[in-house]
Image: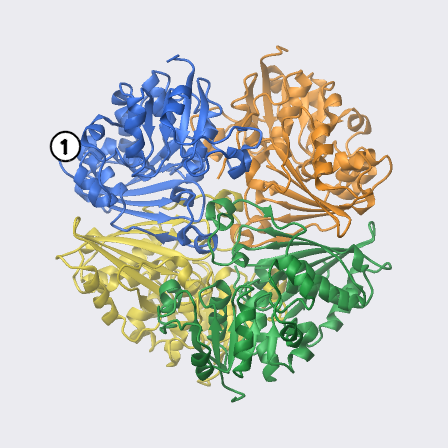
Chain colours: A yellow, B blue, C orange, D green
Amino acid sequence: MNTTHIRAAIVGSTGYGGVELIRLLQSHPYVSVTSVISSSAAGAPIAEGFPHLTEIRTDLLDGVDVELIRGKADVVFLATPHGVSMKLAPEFLAAGLKVIDLSGDYRLKDGEAYRKWYKHEPAAKADVDSAVYGLAEVYGEQVSKTNFVSNPGCFTTTSLLGLYPAVKAGWIDPDSIIIDAKSGVSGAGRGLSLGNHYSEINENFKAYKVNNHQHTPEIEQVLSEAAGRPVVTTFTPHLVPMTRGIMATMYATMTEKRGTEQFMELYRQFYEGRRFVRIRPLGQLPATKEVTGTNYCDIGFSADERTGRITIISVTDNLVKGAAGQAIQNLNLTMGWDESLGLAFTPVYP
Amino acid sequence: MNTTHIRAAIVGSTGYGGVELIRLLQSHPYVSVTSVISSSAAGAPIAEGFPHLTEIRTDLLDGVDVELIRGKADVVFLATPHGVSMKLAPEFLAAGLKVIDLSGDYRLKDGEAYRKWYKHEPAAKADVDSAVYGLAEVYGEQVSKTNFVSNPGCFTTTSLLGLYPAVKAGWIDPDSIIIDAKSGVSGAGRGLSLGNHYSEINENFKAYKVNNHQHTPEIEQVLSEAAGRPVVTTFTPHLVPMTRGIMATMYATMTEKRGTEQFMELYRQFYEGRRFVRIRPLGQLPATKEVTGTNYCDIGFSADERTGRITIISVTDNLVKGAAGQAIQNLNLTMGWDESLGLAFTPVYP
Amino acid sequence: MNTTHIRAAIVGSTGYGGVELIRLLQSHPYVSVTSVISSSAAGAPIAEGFPHLTEIRTDLLDGVDVELIRGKADVVFLATPHGVSMKLAPEFLAAGLKVIDLSGDYRLKDGEAYRKWYKHEPAAKADVDSAVYGLAEVYGEQVSKTNFVSNPGCFTTTSLLGLYPAVKAGWIDPDSIIIDAKSGVSGAGRGLSLGNHYSEINENFKAYKVNNHQHTPEIEQVLSEAAGRPVVTTFTPHLVPMTRGIMATMYATMTEKRGTEQFMELYRQFYEGRRFVRIRPLGQLPATKEVTGTNYCDIGFSADERTGRITIISVTDNLVKGAAGQAIQNLNLTMGWDESLGLAFTPVYP
Amino acid sequence: MNTTHIRAAIVGSTGYGGVELIRLLQSHPYVSVTSVISSSAAGAPIAEGFPHLTEIRTDLLDGVDVELIRGKADVVFLATPHGVSMKLAPEFLAAGLKVIDLSGDYRLKDGEAYRKWYKHEPAAKADVDSAVYGLAEVYGEQVSKTNFVSNPGCFTTTSLLGLYPAVKAGWIDPDSIIIDAKSGVSGAGRGLSLGNHYSEINENFKAYKVNNHQHTPEIEQVLSEAAGRPVVTTFTPHLVPMTRGIMATMYATMTEKRGTEQFMELYRQFYEGRRFVRIRPLGQLPATKEVTGTNYCDIGFSADERTGRITIISVTDNLVKGAAGQAIQNLNLTMGWDESLGLAFTPVYP
């Protein structure tokens, strides 16, 4: 593999995660997308289903053919649903490709948890064990040494970057954590459902999968690692009538009295040198639009003396830092490149 | 006062609360709006600033003239900012009119709390003491005996209807309550600010006044009454890119292990006979659009055995149950009418 | 049939047109909805698919059973797709019910035109001939004498109310007419398609069925009647990222030099006594939100001396005046009631 | 001036046009933004008013000081309101800087027309004469030879790229042209007004400045040049409840019978080699979202045999091709660089 020019294949190119990978990689200096793959639309021009790619991508969609792809690509991104990734990843790995999996299939180390929350049989234990969980700013060291990355969920990334340093430092009580999360609708993908039908969602705000969302055990797995003991958490996702963006508003009881600025300082140190986490100044809390189109995760704090609780607000673009962007960041890490290579976008505002 | 036909004046008719009062009262069988009042636009046709009222209201705006209004009206709705209501209410009361105040001026019984959260001198203590706090489904008995109602805030109404029965019953720990609230933009009124500028809010989601919103002490005042002891609470408002609707997602630790259906039953009993609170069936949580244009407050529950917490979700239309609708409901109560008179709207869906 | 209390059945109650009929009829003083009908969801509670109807409609959906319905209803509204209405209408008429059909099946008097634009065989000619085209403000006289109304399309109603008086008066050249129309997404119904998928429509504006929309011949049929000779027209529908509302921006060459006020006066006279058409004052053009939730059609004008053209802007709520509202208005006319009975709503603003 | 590294100043950096210039230039390989300028907020960090720029731009806003700027920059972009540019441009030109003006001050060659449509005294005639009108795909040749570019309006660019080739070729009757345009709200800028207030615009669609918009004479000036004789046009702008994007739906009578594909071919030839104009395939019409965040102008056609008219639909991102993007494209042309340098973005979709 040439280390300043690699070839990438994207499986699931007709979903929002896949098409966002195409957008971002289009301007990556060291990566060329040589195969865009769709099991359902193989043979069709990619621009037919996505006219915004007219004259940008003129190639046809490939089918899922491991032999074909091994000849065209060095790395494969799996932007496939859970249950599908676990079939493809082992084949691509066996064929000698790097694999970055964006599904939930390799995130949970505990097969029982996978079975319970995904209502599906888990992937082979050996494969699960070999996958590195790619929360880049926390586990970047491990990511840099692997060929197989399990890319975190969008809610998970947004929540954990906001919680990890405080839990690790013992500054908040892990058992008190409540995560109230809000996502734009693109997080639900391009598949049709009444829940994504325009007139049902527009001018509407709703919660879903309350106490029941599959990102819960993923969050708990990392928080437990940080806390050094098992942690359970309340996590509530909501749907916001907008396309992109996630906010996690997080509440926890402080273990001792501390101020907002102390938390800011803790996080600044923890994320030092990591371009994509921006700690907001005192009194400023991030809004989702302020990271649109980028790989940033912006975090703000408000410690409340009255209640003894800290409120932590974290935002990302769910399709970038929450999916395709972090996947590329992880590829960069596995290649030994600067993690921000090809990802230095300025937010699209307004 | 004729008890099946009364005349109403609306002060602040050029704001969203005022114009919603006009909409709702337009079809009230026993109330006629005889004076629409605006200090800033007196003399102009109301339909000039609100063309949707063309041919519906052809009258001119009156100025704030107590003598004039006492001759034209039996009840006055104050859809005025805080600080203004405290000047007008005593005059109208002295003139013998019923007063329904939609501002925050008479909600907090504790003058110090008002001073702290509103950053303004409180109204005269005697007036504050005489005002009845109009959370209709909780304090309807008191409301039915007064001529001076202090109408609750929109966040407050939505949150309290979802929390009161459980706190009163001792089923949740009051100290553990966290309220994560989300409001459509109309809640911020018609006054111009960068925070309400279309391109800044659209496709954006943000928190504001975190640990600092003036509805916090109002919520705490009622929760403290319910708990029988002082309660402090974490309350976070967010702005949703939509016009109408509020959701409060509320978290609390259960005092003993109970299931979702037990909570549903508790609330069904508490609100028995009260048309505007709808307890949703098991497994169904309300979305804001499902109450748009109406005085409903819909509530759903999810008890979580894993964490020992209950999640309570409550939604209203902020301009109706959160403002103008509850104000009319309170008028109905003070008149001895059915509380739903003139308010039996079906939600506008989609 | 009791003339101050009739019973209505709604076929197609799980679509947006059907559920809007339910909303509006809920407050009609002389009509009770006694049967809500759905071929696909018969037996289920209507509130299951439409939770906003919780406690408002507790009945179960009926199947399409003419015998059953004839025993329960005096009038049947067909909120069914084209091709379906033509099967049901003759049966209900034969059973002695009044029929108000909201589909396109009986709108075009010319079977060939139906075949060409709907790509479907037309209904039986005798049935088509017997249906009265229910553009209420134009053909109200005929509507008042029939038991079988073909309710106009949403684009058609909005466009024709803005054009008819000027064409009839010979003030504009019928061959020069261009209709640029914009609709909220609810016009496309509740059926799932990528074209109605939230993330595809939100923050997007697009044209569709350009020179190819089936409301074109319906518009031309009425304009030809007004002009006294065959007229062809350019009609372009667009989709606006909002739920409700239609605007038609219409352009035509004036046959002689006239000013905006002359047009206003012509229309005022034409629509005299018709509550639901509001001619806007000089310099004011209607916006869609100003009629939301109501049966109004608001019209504004701008004559341009430079180009010799008149611009006419007409707005409606596509689900009310463009569908369910006008259907009820037509029922009122057939019953000899005031056409606005049960429809005197104030727009929901903002 | 170093021809592969130039320094840029942006006047009006706190408006949407200015901040979009910052976003786009951030990734331009040959241009550094060395001064961001605001008369109203000089001295403040740019990221204070635009938190999305946190850690991306850490500099303070400069005041409007020609001496200062001449020392820091080679080119100045004027993202200033009309009336302001005409004061600044001559000074910067005299100081030896390249000037790209985004306002309307130098677009109209006819001072009388400026006076009439802008209701303001025109700039000095010599300056107006020396400015090159930067419709890049039409007048690129002239742009490449100047130091003073007058950047076209957003509606103008979108409309003219869709009309110019057909008018020039004599395929459509210039007197028959009608332009029905729709813009996202960001086109109205960041200044506060009730017309941009969220709750007024959201879920609303409205026309404005009908027969009265200042882009009309700008469009007519270019169409007249193309036609070789004076042309007047009907132009109607509308506001769409979305942030970015413009569509112009344009109607004209064909001078002889031609099909859609002939028009496509004419335009393909006219725009050959120009990357930013994309002619859509037969049967496909562009939607605004398909160019979001980019400098593309996408064009589609539908010739209608029935009416003898052609419908041309053209879309741009109003802040990019309609403002900041074309300004940079013009800078590229004046520098002799590839016109797409630094502008090769893939649309942000969804």
In depth, the one of C229 and A51 nearer the eye is C229
Quadrant for residue D102, please give it.
Answer: bottom right
Q: Is residue A316 left or right of residue B214?
A: right
In this view of the protein, can residue B310 be seen by the observer?
no
Q: Which residue reaches farthest bottom?
A: D2
In depth, the one of A271 and A110 nearer the eye is A271
On screen, residue C111 above or below A8: above
In this view of the protein, can residue A310 be seen by the observer?
yes
Tag 1's secondary structure? loop
Q: Where's residue A211, x and y in %?
A: 31, 46
Instruction: Give the mark count.
Output: 1
Q: Is residue B246 left or right of residue D241?
A: left
Quadrant for residue D107, please give it.
Answer: bottom right
Give the residue drawn at x 67%, y 74%.
Answer: D129
Q: Where's residue A57, x and y in %?
A: 60, 70
**Label 1 chain ID:** B
On screen, residue A30 above or below A255: below
Give the residue drawn at x 79%, y 60%.
Answer: D174
Q: Is residue B260 left or right of residue A335?
A: left
On screen, residue A97 above or below B119: below
Kind of residue sitting beneath label 1:
Gly
Quadrant for residue C215, please give it.
Answer: top right
In depth, the one of B115 and D301 nearer the eye is B115
In depth, the one of D138 and B14 nearer the eye is B14
Q: Where's residue A130, x and y in %?
A: 33, 70
Which residue lies under the disc numbered 1? B228
Q: Is residue C194 left or right of residue D10?
A: right
Q: Where's residue A314, x and y in %?
A: 32, 59
Q: Dot 1, crowdedness within 10 Å: few (<14), some or many (≥20)?
A: few
